[in-house]
Image (spheres, rainbow, N blue to C red):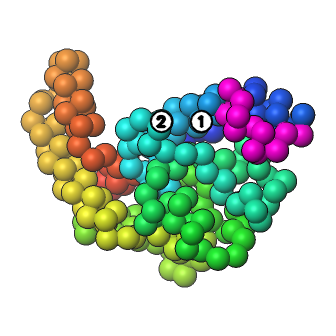
Amino acid sequence: MHKFERGEEPEGLKKARKQKRSWDEFVRTPAHIELAECLYERQERCCAYCDMTIKSIKDGHIEHLERRSNAPKRALDWGNLFFSCQRKDSCGKYKDSEISGAIDSRLVVDPSQEDPLDYFSYAETGEMVVVKRNDEKAETTIKVFNLNTQRLKNARSRAYRNAIVFLKNYDNLGENPPKEAVEEFLNDWREEEFFSSVFRYILKR
Ligand SMILES: [Zn+2]
């Protein structure tokens, strides 16, 4: 999970709310595409929950943190909307199929409002670790989105090791590396499975 700036809501969403449109009506309008694009870009093309890169907008979906069935009034609420990957063993799809009962958004970490690095650190094994002991909010977040599923741990562990190598190699470029060298470096790096949360955590250490 990594922090992103939510910013202003798209006009189409605001308008649909004023018109009291239902979600089913809304998905048939261009404002739905506008909303998906807005979230996708503001989240830097990453899943709001697992932080993995979503290659194209078709590989993700708009996610209601508080489900429409539990919180119909929040169906068009900007603060309740995120862009999620399509994986079934984690994130939005996992939450909706495996977690019973309503989700209270106050009980999970909101990456558009808070910095997840205040709640989570990362082990070399790729495990997401709760920073403060008995932090119910952080623990609930991991559980609800299944963020320590083995697939994610494996991918994060690779990203962790890559980050260490990257930083070492980056040091080797010298004190004032030419701009092109830095760009090339970053592009190679982005080709890999990239978790900005893991990378930021290592930088912070
Ligand atoms: Zn995800």
- The answer to whether the residues at label 1 and label 2 have Cβ atoms under 8 Å apart is yes
Residue 122 x %, y %? 35, 64
Secondary structure state at the residue bearing disc 2: helix
How many numbered markers are drawn?
A: 2
For the point 18% across and 43% down, which residue is it?
Answer: 166
What residue lies at 49% left-to-right and 45% top-to-bottom? 60
Q: Which residues are magenta?
A: 20-32
Which comes before the other along the chain, label 1 or label 2? Answer: 1
> Can residue 3 be seen in this snapshot?
no
Residue 79 position in % (x across, y down): 71, 47
**Residue 131: where, in percent of width, then height?**
46, 70
Q: Residue furthest left?
A: 172
**Disc 2 designates what residue?**
57
Report helix, strand or loop for mark 1: helix
In the shown orientation, is residue 153 left or right of residue 45?
A: left
- Provide the residue designation for mark 1: 36
Could you tell whether 100 is left or right of 115 in the image?
right
Q: Which amino acid type is marked by label 1? A: Ala
Number of other residues with Cα within 10 Å of mark 2, as a class: few under 14, some 14 to 19, many 20 or more: some
Q: Is residue 62 above or below residue 155?
A: above
Whether residue 149 is situated above or below residue 2 in the rendered picture:
below
* Mark 1 residue CB less than 8 A from any atom of ligand 1: no
Task: Decide: few, some or many residues near mark 1? Use Cα within 10 Å; few <14, some 14-19, many ≥20.
Answer: many
Q: For this rendering, which residue is in front, 96 or 205?
A: 96
Amino acid on which the number 2 mark rests in the picture: Ile
Disc 1 from disc 2: Cα separation: 8 Å
Magenta residue check for 38: no
Residue 29 x %, y %: 72, 30
Quarter of image, res 56:
top left
